Amino acid sequence: MYNHQPEKYICPLCQVANGETTERGNLESSVIFRDKNITVYISPKWWRSNPGHVIIIPNVHFKNIYDLPEEYGHAIFDASKKVAIVLKKSYKCDGVSTRQHNEPAGNQDV
Ligand SMILES: [Zn+2]
């Protein structure tokens, strides 16, 4: 639904989920959690004003939130809460933000 994925697209997020090497190298050492549904890793690209950028991805490729089964959405949200608490405790940050992008107009770039 509402897909814009190019043909033969190699998804870098799936490469991380599968422990494969991406154009940014092998990020397996950046993975902080993985279970049957999701992988959580520290992004090699941090937002200038937001150190501690963590990415939570499903272990199965879904093009966007429109196609995401609830089972994975729930797992991502549960992990988001845990990561937020870890960020607060680890960095003593004043706040935590979460993002999820869909379609080019929604800033989806993967
Ligand atoms: Zn993917």
Image: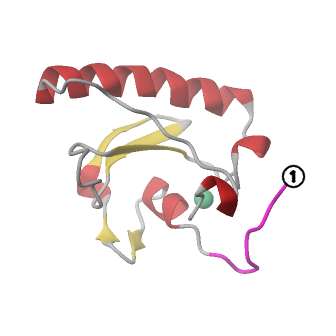
Q: Which residue is mark 1?
A: 1
Identify the magenta region: 1-9
Q: Main secondary structure of the magenta part?
A: loop
Find ligand 1 in the image and state its quadrant.
Answer: bottom right
**Which residue appears at 67% of the width and 51% of the height?**
102
How many marks overall? 1
Which quadrant would residue 92 be assigned to in this image? top left
Position above or below: 66 against 86: below
Q: Is residue 19 left or right of residue 36?
A: left
Which quadrant would residue 61 be assigned to in this image? bottom right
**Which residue appears at 71% of the width and 80% of the height?**
8
Which quadrant would residue 81 be assigned to in this image? top left
Position above or below: 19 against 84: below
Give percent across and percent down for residue 103: 70, 57
Give percent across and percent down for residue 45: 30, 61
Q: Is residue 75 left or right of residue 9?
A: left
For this rendering, which residue is in front, 58 or 47?
Answer: 47
